Image (cartoon, grey):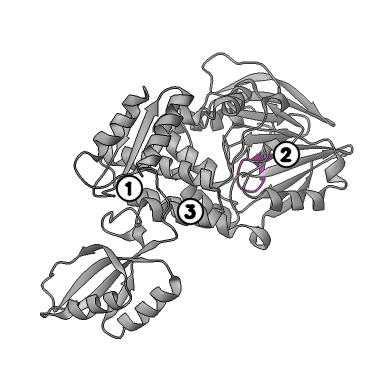
């Protein structure tokens, strides 16, 4: 069994040795250590492997010696920039004011730049917002003061500016639990370590994650405003398309008094989506709830646990079962992608679906074609042929094609980028960071799209993509 310990150690000789002895005494093996003094001189991430009992004993000992005290007790660090005249004693008045308010300084940096001013950057530790507001009011009487967003800072300053501040900010926006907060902290560190080892600056990545989270937090309650349209596809069948501000589309096939959903969007908006479902479908609470999932991405599978039956192709069903059993799906099998997918799952409150609800449709495909026939699937008066992609977007991706009624559900093999609501277009700008790019293999996905359109016959088609509005596609009989 493996476990990650988030430890806070004193900054003196032998601190890590003391922790190592705790693990060794309990027959626990350390498999990874992550420490960056430039980020935080106290925080150390330790991955360890051992039995459940031995890991607990090691954790108890670490707690006894004070290495697991990770809470900041409500404290926060605000990074401020003071524009001071480049003359002797100019910083003294600011330091005196800081002392009057009994603030601690966690970080300080300044360098002359050849002008008449110096820009002092200071990390100020504060517990009460009102007290900080009063301090800023008085400081601005002395000089210009700017509050710096850590996302746009030139370098990483300290624990509160990065790890704890970053995680607490996201956790507050998305209202996640204490346990989830620790998992978010661990995966943030993993992502940071990967970026650091590859020589990539982390700021654009983590700025995108923050902005992604901000978009999710704004699209809630009364501000959750999807575009909803209804499309008649046969005498007995309508399709309702729900295009949310964030996440995948959800389509509802309404045929002969029965309902089949196609994909479900993110889990964080469960209440908002259920409210929409109840408005659109009479007696929603009492009906049999079935869903077909095009592929096993977080933004398509968030509400699967709300349904009685989940229809999925062979490989998608396998991926969902893997997530339920050990929390690792296809995307997380790549260690470079794993921390980002885990962060996305935490922020969107993702829950894996019970494997007993999953019903496999179609067959396992073999071959190297970009789009392979996998079987058939009927609902109401619609008769779909199932095609599985080669994994350009994600292994197990499926397309449904009804040749009689000219209806296509393409998942993310095709998305209608040209017809999105404004919020969805903005979301798609940041989503690839946490979805580890839109496509697993962009070149293969392009071949899949080409193969999809090549399979459509003459006539007018309605293509329901994973994102964006329905596409009307007309193919002349040539």
Report, in whole angstroms, how far the alpha carbon at label 2 lies from the one at label 1. Answer: 37 Å
Q: State the SS at label 3.
A: helix
Q: Name the residue under label 3.
A: 170
Give the quadrant of residue 238.
top right
Relative to 25, 434 lies left or right: right
Q: Mark 2 points at which residue?
A: 306
Residue 459, above or below 366: below
Query: What's the residue at 43%, 25% (across, down)?
Result: 54
Say which of marks 1 and 3 sits in front. Answer: 3
Provide the residue span drawn in magenta: 459-472
Report the magenta stretch's main SS: strand
Q: Name the residue under label 1.
A: 202
Residue 113, above or below 11: below
Q: Which residue lies furthest to the bottom in this view?
A: 141
Residue 384: x %, y % from top left: 74, 27
Relative to 122, 469 lies left or right: right
Q: Please tell me which of labels 2 and 1 falls first in the chain.
A: 1
Report, in whole angstroms, how far the alpha carbon at label 3 lies from the one at label 2. Answer: 25 Å
């Amino acid at each position: 069994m493996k476990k990650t310990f988030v430890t806070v150690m004193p900054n003196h000789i032998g601190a890590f040795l003391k922790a190592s002895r705790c693990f060794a005494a309990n027959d626990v093996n350390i498999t990874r250590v992550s420490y960056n003094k430039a980020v935080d001189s106290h925080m150390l991430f330790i991955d360890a492997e051992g039995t459940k009992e031995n890991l607990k004993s090691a954790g108890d000992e670490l707690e006894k010696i004070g290495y697991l005290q990770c809470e900041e007790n409500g404290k926060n660090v605000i990074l401020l920039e003071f524009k001071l005249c480049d003359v002797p004693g100019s910083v003294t008045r600011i330091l005196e004011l800081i002392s009057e308010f009994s603030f601690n300084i966690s970080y300080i940096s300044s360098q002359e730049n050849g002008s008449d001013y110096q820009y002092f950057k200071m990390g100020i530790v504060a517990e009460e917002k009102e007290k900080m507001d009063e301090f800023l009011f008085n400081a601005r009487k002395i000089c210009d003061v700017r509050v710096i967003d850590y996302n746009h800072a030139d370098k990483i300053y300290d624990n509160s500016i990065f790890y704890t501040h970053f995680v607490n900010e996201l956790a507050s926006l998305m209202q996640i639990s204490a346990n989830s907060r620790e998992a978010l902290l661990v995966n943030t560190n993993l992502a940071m370590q990967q970026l650091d080892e590859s020589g990539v600056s982390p700021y654009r990545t983590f700025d995108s994650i923050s902005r992604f989270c901000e978009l999710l937090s704004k699209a809630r309650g009364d501000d959750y405003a999807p575009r909803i349209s209804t499309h008649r596809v046969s005498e007995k069948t309508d399709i309702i398309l729900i295009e949310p501000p964030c996440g995948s589309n959800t389509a509802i096939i309404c045929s002969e008094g029965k309902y089949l959903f196609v994909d479900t969007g993110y889990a964080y908006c469960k209440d908002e989506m259920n409210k929409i479902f109840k408005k659109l479908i009479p007696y929603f609470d009492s009906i049999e709830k079935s869903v077909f999932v095009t592929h096993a991405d977080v933004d398509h599978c968030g509400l699967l646990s709300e349904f009685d039956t989940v229809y999925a192709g062979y490989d998608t069903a396998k991926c969902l079962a893997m997530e339920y059993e050990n929390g690792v799906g296809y995307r997380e099998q790549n260690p470079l992608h794993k921390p980002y997918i885990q962060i996305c799952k935490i922020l969107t409150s993702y829950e894996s679906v019970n494997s007993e609800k999953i019903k496999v449709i179609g067959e396992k495909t073999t071959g190297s074609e970009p789009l392979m026939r996998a079987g058939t699937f009927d609902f109401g008066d619609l008769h779909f042929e199932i095609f599985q992609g080669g994994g350009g977007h994600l292994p197990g991706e499926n397309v449904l094609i009804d040749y009689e009624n000219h209806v296509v559900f393409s998942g993310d093999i095709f998305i209608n980028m040209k017809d999105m609501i404004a919020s969805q277009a903005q979301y798609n700008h940041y989503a690839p960071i946490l979805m580890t790019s839109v496509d697993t293999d962009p070149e293969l996905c392009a071949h899949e799209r080409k193969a999809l359109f090549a399979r459509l016959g003459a006539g007018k088609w309605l293509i329901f993509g994973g994102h964006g509005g329905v596409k009307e596609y007309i193919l002349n009989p040539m």
